[in-house]
Amino acid sequence: MSYCETQSLAIGYGTPLLRDISLQAECGRILALIGPNGAGKSTLLKTLAGQLAAQSGAVLLDGKTLTTYTPNARARKLALMLPHTARTELTTCFDVAAAGRYPYTGRLGILSDEDKQQVRDALHLVQADELAARDFTKISDGQRQRVLLARAVCQQPEILLLDEPTSFLDVKGKAELMAVLQTLAHEKNVAIIVTLHELELAQKLADAVVCVSPQGVSGVLTPKEAFARENICHLFDLSDEQYTALFSEKPKLKFEHYIRSGQKLLRCGYTTGTCAALGAAGAARLLLTGHTPESVGLRTPKGIVVEVAPQFCCRTATGAECAIVKDGGDDIDATTGLPVVAEVTLLPDAPHTVTIDGGAGVGRVTKPGLDQPVGAAAINHVPRQMITEALLKEAETAGYSGGFSVIIRIEGGEQAAKRTFNPHLGVEGGLSVLGTSGIVEPMSQQALLDSLQLEIHQAALHSRRLILAPGNYGLDYLTQNYPELHEIPIVKVSNFIGEALDMAAAEHFAEVLLVGHVGKLVKLAGGIMNTHSKQADCRTELFCALAALCGADRATCRALMDAATTDACLDILTAANLKKTVMASLLQAIQLHLDRRAAEAFTVGAVLFSNQNGPLGQTQQAEKLLQSWKEN
């Protein structure tokens, strides 16, 4: 049954731009509007949302004419997300997202605890939790898109309208947005209407399609009908040659290797190192045989064979180059979709030698302690070995006894590197070519732990003291409250607190201070050293248990168990005059478990704070460390 539909609708500004529009959007389905620029997609969307008055005809929402709804009643049913243009002053991302709750807050606009939880849930859904306290004017355009989507989700709409929501998003951001919209439609039964320019994205996302052109608006089409060659050529006025150039129909080989995660099968991908080796093999084969390879393959160090079709393979002035597009499988990152290009030159007078260097988009090592020496291209030793083996195999097959010179570049790598840890680790100007197994396993934590290990190792080159912070809140708290500690290395460890402590022990640190939000560090009081909510979430249980030991009555314990956040727990403890006592007990338990994990390898303490409640205390060992550090 249609949730939103139009009847003989005409739209425009004064003079009708498009007439006789008849479309239907259903709950639980995504309807994509596609068509050339200027055809009227945004105008249609604004008319459906009630921002523009219809020239004639009607828009029906849940069976009633849109104009019969009051603004608040309409806002509870419909949310519109437009590309961000307006700027705000001194407004946090939480406040921007919270604007979506105003249809529910009454005249005073005061957010209830339930409203605030809805905002937090929406920010979490769009993966913008860490942006909550950030200034909305000081984040990237892509991050603003996430916050604006969270604002729309906060309205708890039954229909969601989005105008070009992928604007400013990188490859990973687009993939995450697709997942959010599919969750809203298929799991939460929201009707979604979205305008998109990227046809490949629209084809993967849409359950139904409406084509908008200056000649008129189509009826509701199936994706198969809408994206048929003939329809796309007609809609965008493309010649056959233009269509072929834009939408090559050459079949692509898809890497089909899966691992099981819970009840799901997740598709694996292959690393940038595998791409580089495949590209080198393809370019060498063209040079040695004179034939452009339809596909190239190799056996990765993990023992899994990867065979893919090159994006292109052609001769150059000095040799040949071959591009392999990085495929991260279901573990999409900043490199997924980027072409990794290997340019190969033959060295007939250098038997069986292979020289490897990095070109545009591949970073350079600027700090000691990484896989390669300072000044070298950031192509790690395993990818170098894979490239060498792939080239020598091609040489053996072709009966060639000379050597090869290889330059690896990554198109778009310099820009993508800004979204990675590379600049912080000491890799400048581009991405690293990585991969110890050659295969990317979805949901794997290994890449994050490898980066964390590198950061802690580099910190150990300069100091025997170390500060660990789970996230940006901790980093900001340190800057504001302990500016005198700026010379001590600080490493952001995410949820991997136990692993970080183990790494600190392996690097022989003498003193370690952990500074974090109570929402994370409270879990340490129960011995939980991976603080991700998927591992365990016993925050309220711990507060309840400690409060009970400190004399809390049954009502207080029940309130703690029912609390939504740690700040809510703190408010309950304050009201019961137990906050100071319970926090002392909590800090004592945290110190106990930190000492157990450190196992006397180093001295360790913890500092806790809350964004709402400020400083919450420090363990006795942390107090001693801070005093010693300030004096020395």
Image (cartoon, rainbow, N blue to C red):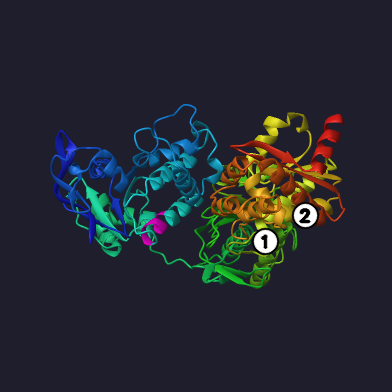
Asked whether 287 falls inside the magenta stretch, the response is no
Residue located 64% across and 40% down the image: 577
Q: Earlier in the sequence, mark 1 or mark 2?
A: 1
Q: At label 2, which amino acid type do we have?
A: His
Residue located beneath label 1 in the image:
387
* Residue 350 in which image quadrant: bottom right
Whether residue 365 is visible, yes or no, is no
Most foreground residue, 104 or 404: 104
- Residue 556's disc is none
Q: Nearer the viewer, residue 502 or 234?
A: 502
Report if residue 590 is visible in the image.
Answer: yes
Q: Quadrant of the N terminus?
A: bottom left
Start-end of magenta stretch: 181-186
**Number of numbered discs overlaid on the protein picture:** 2
SS assignment at label 1: helix
* Picture quadrant where residue 279 is located: bottom right
Q: Secondary structure at mark 2?
A: helix
Q: Which residue is mark 2?
A: 593
Q: Position of residue 323 (x, y in %)?
A: 54, 57
Query: Is residue 28 shown above or below 19?
Result: below
Using a 10 Å C-alpha cutoff, classify the residue at mark 2 as few (fewer than 14 neighbours), some (14 to 19) or many (20 or more).
some
Nearest the viewer among 230 and 37 is 37
Three-letter residue code for mark 1: Ile
Residue 184 is inside the magenta segment:
yes
> Quarter holding the C terminus?
top right
